[in-house]
Amino acid sequence: MVNSYLENLNEPQHEGVVNVEGPCMIIAGAGSGKTRVLTLRITHLIQQHQVDPFNIMALTFTNKAAKEMRNRIEKLVGPDARNLWMGTFHSVFSRILRAEAHHIGYPSNFTIYDTDDSKSLLRSIIKEMGLDDTQYKVNTVYNRISSAKNRLISWQEYISNPVLIADDAANMRPEIGNIFKNYSLRCFKSGAMDFDDLLFNTDKLFKEHLEVLNKYQHRFQFVLVDEFQDTNLCQYFIIRKLAAVQQNICVVGDDAQSIYAFRGADITNILNFEKDYPDLRIIKLEQNYRSTQTIVEAANSVIAKNKAQLPKHVWTSNEEGTLIELIKAVSDNEEGKLVASSIFEEKMQQQLKFSDFVILYRTNSQSRAIEEALRRMNIKYKVVGGLSFYQRKEIKDVLAYLRYALNQQDEASFRRIINYPKRGIGDTTIDKIVVAANDHGISIWEVLQNVTPFVGNRAAAPIDDFVTKIKRFGIEIENKDAYEAASEIAKSSGLLKELYEDKTVEGLSRYENVQELLNAIKEYTDDPEKEDKSLGAFLQEVSLITGQDEDKDNDPDKVTLMTIHMAKGLEFKNVYIVGMEEDLFPSQMMLSSRSELEEERRLFYVAITRAQKKLFLSYALTRYRFGRLKNCEPSRFLDDISSRFMKVSTRFGGVESVAPNPNFAKSFVSGMKKSISSQPAPPKPAAYKPSADFAPSDTSGLKEGMKVEHPKFGFGSVLKIEAIGAERKAKINFTDFGEKTLLLSFAKLKIHEN
């Protein structure tokens, strides 16, 4: 049937597909079928208007989106769809530059530098200029240059701009302009462009060579842009130039889902689009096909609080659905337990799969408590867009320092930390140390303590400093609890300083992760249930928790964990948004202006609209931040949701309805705190005093049934011994303390004759 693809479209969708002439903006609410309309619009151009696919440019933000749209179109129009100029901004513009780069002095076979290539070159330039690489962090410099290019600022304009120069001077990095200059000239000399150059140089090409611009203006009769709210200044300038002659530009997006300002996205592109095209046709896709009425209306009540937005009202004919459930917890650890229990209960009651659930958080560091709770309930999960908390590099780095300070025979930890942060100890020196240890039949630690004969005086100095540090760390461990020792080690090792000085988004995330590790240690030492507050005891517990981290199975039935930014464009039956607290969400770093706060609210809107059937929000009354137990206030965003869409969970003992009250989220906090304080503390066993002749035994031959003594838990019997990778753990039934599982490399056990 002719034009069968137009069937089953609602009226605005139909309008968006068939009205192809002139400038058009399709405002697509969450779950409104945006991708369908965009692909069918292109199909309609090819089939109904006989437009050659070679004359259509369609720009997306991900290769996945471009591939999905191309496949859909190909099913409708055949292999001719392969001739579309469809892809990401970078891929499409690099194609143009391959043909035209000679106009701006580049070869057609120019090299494209990826991020690592760019940073490697910047690292070399910083070194060649004799600059302090701790002051001129490569990530900071890279992001500064990238930001300039995305705002169409060349190195020539940068070094002559007094505002930029003053800003760099204020940040103690006055040479960034010269680094930018040297970097740009080196790239040009090498015939190379980085990712930002693919946009910057396309704009430069069109600006300086009007005949080239004119050629592409007439080639591309129709220009279409997906996720328009995510475009930056450079991207918008290019597409505006390309569409200037034909005026057939169609942009699709949702201002309410503009959440990437930190990457350079400029929401004013979509908010002010009508000013550039006064005869603009505006089509609003407002019917949501994804979520229940409750979720849609709750999302509307949230986004309505923003002032900078395009007016629309998203609605749905789906079922009303259940109320949004608000989970209140005493602490972040309890929040994790309640969320994990809720997921397990929902799965059983509703006959769902774990893959029907997603847990969303504002920052990566929040995953720690959630992951530990899921592990304890044997719920499989996957972390999307990042590593499991204890697998992240910065966490492994800190743990390696802690482990080596505790056990100087740990070669893996030694190799990880010996030159991080950098202290001038190269791979050749490390190899000499290892060879010396093997040749003389002694440990690496013994070589390190008398290293000069093996590596020479010059290389010995930084190693001697390292040895002195490790010995001092050992004293800290002996005399302080786990948190005090770990904090001192993280600080004195230089790790915290290294991460703190990296002010990029990634650097801040890594610093937050290390702080969260320290928070976990502080929580451990503050727990009255923990008899042994030592660093060794904490590391043992971490090793037991993370022993199964290397999950090799391909089972797709797992709970998904991700940041809200990563969740954009996805949908799940059940969504949990955790950490709904002031200074966490909204982030305390996003409260200095209305525009920042409104972006945070849009982020919350995106999180809500990922849910199809059920939405759960959770927050904690207390959370460790920077090693201190902090009282938390519920997020202001909870008050943005009309109370008629909410119920407060009292898991596990039913759910109580909430009377309409615009500030109900804060109303029960004081009562909750009273309830907590009135709970009696659990009785603790009397402290055990070890035998006068107590001394740890060699546990390599430990077997089930043996009697052992522990300096904290007293006497017990070995019930079971298991292997975790290279480690061995023992389950022991202690007479006064019950069953405990201990890692034998950490446990100080004395074996007694049966």
Image: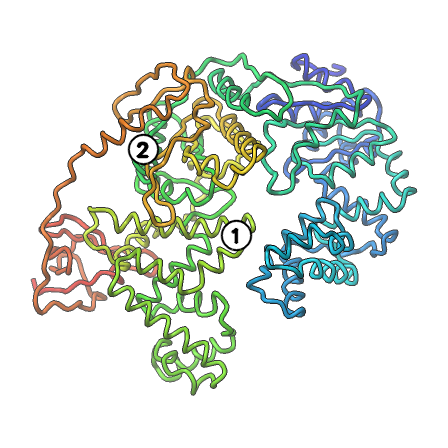
> How far separated are the C-alphas under marks 1 and 2?
30 Å
Query: Which disc number belongs to residue 329?
Result: 2
Residue at 75 percent across and 27 percent down: it is 250
Task: Using the rendered image of the protein, determine whether residue 227 is visible from the camera's viewpoint.
Answer: no
N-term mark: 1 or 2: 2
Drawn side of residue 100 relative to residue 139, left or right: right
Name the residue type under label 2. Answer: Ala
Task: Using the rendered image of the protein, determine whether residue 253 is visible from the camera's viewpoint.
Answer: yes
Drawn side of residue 602 relative to residue 615, left or right: right
On the image, the x and y values in percent for residue 486 come to: 34, 59
On the image, the x and y values in percent for residue 527 come to: 24, 46
Tell me if residue 677 comes above or below residue 538 in the rendering.
Answer: above
Taking depth in this image into account, of 346 and 492 the one nearest to the observer is 492
Pointer 2 local density, CA inside 10 Å: few below 14, some 14–19, many at least 20: many
Tell me if residue 500 comes above or below residue 439 in the rendering.
Answer: above
Taking depth in this image into account, of 79 and 526 the one nearest to the observer is 526
Applied colour scheme: rainbow
Q: What element carries label 2?
A: strand
Is the N terminus in the top left, top right, bottom left or bottom right quadrant?
top right
Locate residue 20: give its quadrant.
top right
Which residue extends farthest bottom? Answer: 453
Drawn side of residue 591 relative to residue 197, left or right: left
Q: Is mark 1 on a helix, strand or loop?
A: helix
From the image, tell me which residue sits under label 1: 507
Name the residue type under label 1. Answer: Gly
Which residue extends farthest right? Answer: 211
